[in-house]
Image (tube, grey):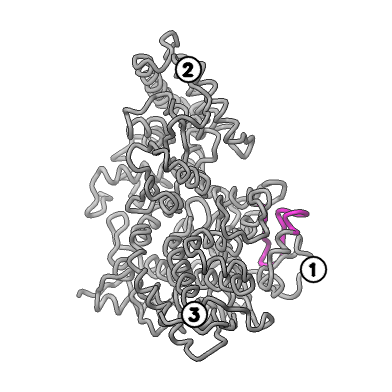
Amino acid sequence: MGRIAGVTAAETRERLLRAAADVFAERGYDGTRVADIAAAAGVSNGALYAHFASKADLLAGALRAHGRNLLAGMFAADPGRPVVELLLLAGRSLARRRDARGYLIVEALVAARRDEDVARPMREYVGERAGFLAELTRLAQAGGELDPALSPDALAHFCLLLAMGSALVTPDLHAIGEDEWAALLTRVAGALARTGITEPDGSNPVKLHIDPERCQGHGRCYDLAPGLFGDDEEGYGQVLGDGVVPPDQEDAARRAVANCPECAIDLLEET
Amino acid sequence: MAADDRFVYQEPTGDEPEGVRSEIITGPVSDWATDFSHLEPEWSADPYPIQDDLRQRCPIAHTGRFGGGWLPTRYEDVTAIAYDTERFSSRSIIMGNFRPPHDIAPVGGSPPISSDPPFHHHARKLLLPAFTKTAVSRQEPATRALCHSLIDAFEGRDVVDAAADYAQHIPMRVIAGMLGFPPQDGPRFREFVESVLEGINLAPEERIERLERLFTYLLAQVHDHLDNPREDLTSYLIDAELFGRKLDADVVTGAMALLLIAGIDTTWSAIGASLWHLARTPADRERLVAEPGLLPTAVEEFLRAYAPVTMARLVKQDMHWHGVDMKADDWILLSFPAANRDPAQFDRAGQVVIDREVNRHAAFGLGIHRCVGSHLARMELRVALEVWLERIGEFTLADPAAVTWSAGQIRGPRALPLRLVTASRPG
């Protein structure tokens, strides 16, 4: 039945989602045939329909599995991390160029405008994203990080607009300097915070973060600051421990940030 | 072991997909902005003034040679193309007079360098674990010993060819060891490298015959490994699985070809260019002899200033891009060396600053096609220079006019006569 010996159903499903993400991102929803996705995944059309009922179903599945959702990824990796810090990190990356999958959402939103079959699962998907953001806001309010008077739904909506808008207004169309953008976000976060976030003045502890979507495994970070970074089994950079930089290693941390060819490392000042 | 029917030689059936050949145009370039060619001697001898000039007056140059192509020289444009796999295909990465058929994508002839998403991700994943910094550090002691033995052989000579007698042997021996090929086949590797990378403007029949020699050799190595499996990359690729199936024969031999060709010429060029620089810059040479701890920083600067590798892409569809009208199947000559000398990105871009602190160079490419062998190349380059500087502190160009540089997309010295001012020290 189109199954490849030694491959589980879950693996086939995962392969289909990966192929769907790449093919939709490249050709758009209308330009993609279900057979193209089956071919890219190396399975038969029959096997594809055993997993997904329709093209719209595949699109929503691909978005959930492989669409860009930096915030959810970072939260899952480190649930104890301050929410405002997560928002700032995710916000900074919005101004950067991303890989093709980062623009999958654009294809899905356009298709949802024209095709009710897509609009239905997309309303559900956007609802999930907004719900996650609102939940994160409540968490931050309960933890005393964000002003309790803020409407979680309004902040969630605001973040969604930024995230989705950034997929539409790409750096190719209109670019903004990383530092200027980061400074603005810090100001916005300061206005939302209960305690207020201060402008970085170099006196606070700093914390490292690698954007896994940008890291390509050049290894400059673990070459230059082996006490702060390591590599995984494929050579991609990893921040060691919780990423907080001991004061005596701040120079090494800044050197690693400044030498990353992909600009994949962020250094955040803690407050 | 049971016969592996993937690797049985098949007579060409005549049904193989055909690519497109363009007219071979050689001879002096009239204007680099409208007629560039990376295969002319002026480019090989010194491409940097040409690139600097183009960056100022025509940042995306054009040529009608090779069936049409573009040469961006700004860091910004080079990186935008490297990141944009949707508009620029890696279906062929050697700019020449032959464009492979469209249906060769997304795998391409030598995966993963010739692959596009989504296949690229899977093919690259197969190779990454073998080339991490930790994995390649296992090659370091043997590499160091080899460098010493090459210098031992200089005994009694005051002029040596650092390209032919030193630089080339290091990556050849290392990659032959990793692939499990006979170490004495080095001279054949050199022939393969020259055929693939420098034989661009040869007549098609000659070019095809030379490439066939390479693949016949690789198939023989595959059969040797089928008969005697061992712990090396060739056996690993023969056994590797993708999507629950073993790899197709042309994926196995394509990846082997990539590792062999890309593993040799590039590092050979980087070692040679670094020694060339040190031979003519006594201040840098003396400083590195006195401060060996500075070498890793200097290595990055040599990689920036003398980046050996230029890649190519093919435009996927007609489009207006950053001010020029590109046509489907136009070449892009993706010059990382030109990007690395863009003054908009690098302070003192045209100078070699061996203690440069911030050095976001693109010598190993950017984005999903980052050189899979970059950790190996860095190790070889660092060890080759470390041993050379330790054993031969003082050296000069014996005859600057006798230095020759390779033609094409990989640039480095191919003849580099150096005068050893102090006799080599015992290792």
Q: Is residue B156 left or right of residue A53?
A: right
- Viewer-side residue, A255 vs B101: A255
Identify the residue under disc 2. A196
**Alpha-carbon span between mark 2 and mark 1:** 63 Å
Instruction: Residue lying at the far left in this picture: please name it.
Output: B1
Q: Where B45 sits versus A165, above or below?
A: below
**Alpha-carbon span between mark 3 and mark 2:** 61 Å
Identify the residue under disc 3. B166
Q: Nearer the viewer, mark 2 or mark 1?
A: 2
Query: Residue B167: horizontal and vertical position, in percent?
Result: 50, 76
> Residue flagged by tag 2: what amino acid is it?
Gly
Task: Identify the residue at horizontal 49%, vertical 29% (top origin).
Answer: A91
- Viewer-side residue, A77 vs A24: A77
Return the chain for callout 1: B
Q: Quadrant of residue B328?
A: bottom right
Return the chain for callout 3: B
Marks 2 & 1 on one chain: no
Q: Where B74 sits versus A185, above or below?
A: below
Q: Quadrant of residue B174?
A: bottom left
The quadrant of the picture occupied by the C terminus of chain A is top left
Return the chain for callout 2: A
User: Residue A248's mark?
Assistant: none
Query: Residue A209: horizontal and vertical position, in percent?
Result: 42, 38
Identify the residue under disc 1. B30
Q: Which residues are drawn in magenta?
A: B53-74
Q: Is residue B258 covered in magenta?
A: no
Badge 3 element: helix
Task: Identify the residue at horizontal 54%, vertical 61% (top origin).
Answer: B298
Query: Residue B133: horizontal and vertical position, in percent?
Result: 38, 59
> Residue flagged by tag 1: what amino acid is it?
Ser
Badge 2 element: loop
Badge 1 element: loop
